[in-house]
Amino acid sequence: MTCHEMDLELKKERGNLGHLFMMVVFGDLMGLPLLPPYYSMRLLPYIIPSIEKWKRSLLREKDLTDLVSADI
């Protein structure tokens, strides 16, 4: 039980870094072109399975309680 909270925090941090990577590489799908399309197209076959999940998580409505529960 002592490692459970640390495990949850690490999973949450990994997810945040994954979202950040997707935004930098495929930000043009959301209207934020940051990298040239050549590199995005080279990585696209590896990212296709997770694009829909990423877009849903970015466009999900955030609530104040989400931020508060993350700090507790």
Image (cartoon, rainbow, N blue to C red):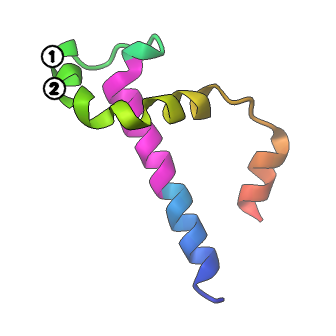
The disc placed on residue 50 is none
Please identify the dominant SS of the magenta region.
Answer: helix
Q: Which residue is mark 1?
A: 38
Residue shown at the point (56%, 57%) measured from the top left: 12
Q: Is residue 71 left or right of residue 12?
A: right
Q: Quadrant of the N terminus?
A: bottom right
**Residues at marks 2 and 1, CA–CA distance in whole angstroms:** 6 Å
Q: Which amino acid type is marked by label 1?
A: Tyr
Residue 18 in the magenta stretch? The answer is yes
Q: Residue at x 64, y 76 (%)?
A: 5
Q: Position of residue 64 (x, y in %)?
A: 83, 41
Q: Which mark is residue 42?
A: 2
Residue lying furthest front in this view? 49
Residue 6 in the image, given as x and y percentages of width and height: 57, 75
Point 54% across, 73% down: residue:
7
Q: Of helix, strand and loop, which one carries label 1? A: helix
Q: What range of the chain is rendered magenta?
A: 14-27
Query: Vertical placement of 71 versus 56: above or below?
Result: below
Circle 1 crowding by C-alpha within 10 Å: few under 14, some 14–19, many from 20? few
Compared across the picture, whether 51 is left or right of 34 comes to right
Quadrant housing residue 45:
top left
Q: Position of residue 65 (x, y in %)?
A: 84, 47
Q: Are marks 2 and 1 in contact (CB under 8 Å)?
A: yes
Residue ID at (15%, 16%): 38
Which type of secondary structure does the marked residue at label 2 adopt?
helix
Callout 2 environment at 10 Å: few (<14), some (14 to 19), or many (20+)? few
The quarter in which the C terminus is drawn is bottom right
Q: Quadrant of residue 18?
A: top left
